[in-house]
Image: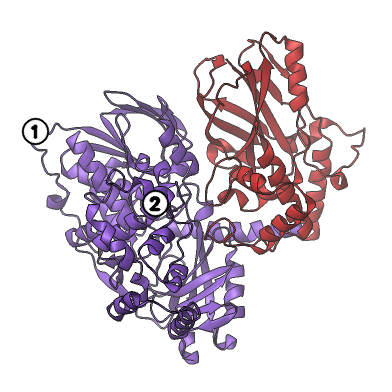
Amino acid sequence: MKNINRRIFIRNTVYSGLSASIMPAQLIAKDAVTDDEATPESSTETTRKKKVIVAGAGISGLCCAYELMKKGHEVVVLEASGRYGGAVLSVHDGLADGLYADFGAENFTKPGYENYWKYIEEFKLSVLPYFHRENILTRIDGVWQTDEIQKEAYNVRVRQLGGFNKRETQFLLSNPSSDLQLLYLEPYFDKFIDEYKPFGIGYDHLENTSISEIYKKEGASKAAITILDGDKTSALYGIWQAYIMNKRGYDKKLKLFRLEGGNQVLTDALGRRLGSRVKLDCKILEIENSETGVKVKYKEFGETKEMSADFMACCLRTTALKKILVTPTLPPQKQFVFDNLAYDQKTRIVFQARSKFWLEDNISINLTFNHPALLKIWQVADEVATDRVSLMAVAPGGTNPLRTLEAFKELYPGKKSNINIEQALVKDWSSDQFVHGCERHGFSGLGELSKYWPHIMTVHGRIHFGGAHTDNRSWGMEAATNSAIRVALEIEKA
Amino acid sequence: MNNVMKYIFIFSIILAGCRPNNMDLSIENAFYSGFSKSYGYRGNANLTGALMVIWPKNVSYDKTQEIRPPKVKILLSQKNEELYTWHEYVRYSIDVLDTIDGDSKYSEINVTEVVLEIEFLPITEGKELNEEEIKDKIKITEKEPEHIGLSLMKYSTCFSCHADKTKHTGPSFSEIAERYENTPSNVESLAGSILEGSKGVWGSEWMSSNPDLTILETERIATFILNQGAKKNNWILPGLEGTFRIIQKPENEVKGLYVLTASYTSASKMRGQHSVILNIR
């Protein structure tokens, strides 16, 4: 018990220091809200002004509320925690010289994130390129390997498996090996009409077939079948996801970006425009769903209150929804989603170092450790003019940050005496009371997709369901903005 | 911990171990009106034998006022309803008041120390229960000292990713129990995963390691997970609030009882409990 008590003390110490530093929201966005920008568009003549309760002020709830506000609808956002932004969380306090880091959503891409990019342009936010997935050193079986070494190991494995066939070899002359599956899946893309509708286009039977069977049927080599590794992945799910990736250009080389000052700049911009429409510390307890509207019981600073509206845009994670009583009971398909949807859980640790110590060792700081207390690390906020640096480390949920630091020191591929880390801040999402979970898991298993889709996004009565988990891919801020805009349109048309 | 702190801590434990077990702990029956009595639930149930100390007879209880067991109360969302129906959702919240830790109303309570245990007791058709029989039923469910595995899990971060019967990030206890029989070798194997962390057994997500725990402690956690996961009519829900769904009507039963027991273990290692019975029709 002594050990456990010590552990709790360490964790609580770190958390309390952290929460104190984060709670004053970092209102550092460079954009300014003018009266013109904040003025809602008037509702169209054919659309009645509606009152909408938005549940949750994560990026999805904020975005949905903003869209509805612009259409002239009356919106109230009820947020259980004391800040808005949810899993978009940038930290500045506790770091020296203007350094900062994103504890939550870390980057966005081009191509991709189309709806997200629209807000960047609308709010005139500063974007920076992000190179943390380039020039990576990866620790495999205790040995540090460059991308080139891994590529060579890949080629050796292909040769050992008998090599690719002529068609595959020809395809790979002009495509990266990461796109090999497209050779066999692209012919299936034509039937898709709507990227949100994988069922009813003639592929339903493929839900219980493994995607390996598709590769075999299409004449893939043993090497390709082995490397693509799809024995446990439903063919329908695999084809659907490959189609979405292809449609959005994700199978091309992606460029990564982040917002200058931290990605929270965007949620801050949304929140400021919504103003007092966002009510913090308002935890929803019960939702009464009827044919004519919704009635919500919520707790505001210990006092139970009620609010009615024409519609609800529910942008809460299922981890929060599980705790809310919804009457009448939602259909079993929706309840299954609530009970079974799984999320990633990560701990983010920000290290501050006195200098770019890794340069003395002539190595990259984009390091993948594959260690239970430290998965990977990279540099953030590299544009800040200072010798000091901030590093972002990722570990499984529940990891003690001091163990992460210990693992870093033990396994760092350069000279250990060069390490000059002087500060550690932590955010363990797995213990967050309000944002309990990062990105949701997929539905790739045989027979799994129909258990979740489309039920996860289906409207029930006057409740419309948004949030990143309800989109067809789970990439954080893209999925969040996509789902928010979908829900806003649904309510606008309802 | 310096010597002064150690002395205070030990003294607290001594005081904690000597409280009467049945104070402020009542079982309320939502069906039988006016049925609300104390049944002597253990208010300090998780004290280990090593910490039990005989209370000197010449010391008055009044002197223990500051460290009495925390008050725990279950609140249910239904309005004046005496009957609950099969497959109905119930929202609950738990109020905790501890003289040292504080009040859940002001967010002063460590929510990881609050647990709701739910047990379903079937009642055979045609066999109405009188008050005494209900008391007997409740005695059956009277809690043993909290399983040390559960106590250890509350101190660690297990419940951040795992739940008893539903999936979150990692597998539920019931999924684990379904895959692994409760055998010494499986307990040892699971304990190893808890201690070292793991990846690839239930998916691609890493489970963090728990090097602060001892092998014995991880074995106790593994034992608890396998025991609890195998229970079909018993659910463990951590935290101060949530919802649960009453089971569908079993084929051979028309009635049943849901015994809800909320517990909180204070920083002074005192455990408070409160139980409520729901009559299911």
Please name whichever residue, B85 or A10, is drawn nearer the observer in this view of the structure.
B85
In the image, what residue type sits under mark 1? Thr
Please name whichever residue, B17 or A270, is drawn nearer the observer in this view of the structure.
A270
Q: Is residue A352 visible?
A: yes
Q: Is residue A27 visible?
A: no
Q: Which of the labelled discs sits on residue A86, or is there none?
A: 2
Q: Quadrant of residue A287?
A: top left
Contact between marks 1 and 2 (CB within 8 A): the answer is no
Chain shown in purple: A
Give SS at disc 2: loop
Residue A141 percent across, percent down from the top left: 59, 77
Q: Is residue A73 above or below residue B50?
A: above
Q: Is residue A73 above or below residue A125?
A: above
Chain shown in red: B
- Residue at the far left: name it: A45
In the image, what residue type sits under mark 2? Gly
Q: Is residue A117 left or right of residue A203?
A: left
Return the disc, 1 or 2, that comes first in the chain's sequence.
1
Q: Which of the labelled discs sits on residue A329, or is there none?
A: none
In which quadrant of the rendered image does the C terminus of chain A lie? top left
* CA distance separating discs 1 and 2: 34 Å
Could you tell me which chain the residue with mark 1 belongs to? A
Q: Is residue B145 left or right of residue A88?
A: right
Q: Give the class, few, some or many, for how many residues have Cα within 10 Å of label 2's Cα (few <14, many ≥20).
A: many
Residue A164 percent across, percent down from the top left: 40, 77
Could you tell me which chain the residue with mark 2 belongs to? A
Q: Is residue A329 left or right of residue A454?
A: right
Please name whichever residue, A455 or B26, is drawn nearer the observer in this view of the structure.
A455
| Tag 1 residue | A46
Residue B62 percent across, percent down from the top left: 80, 31
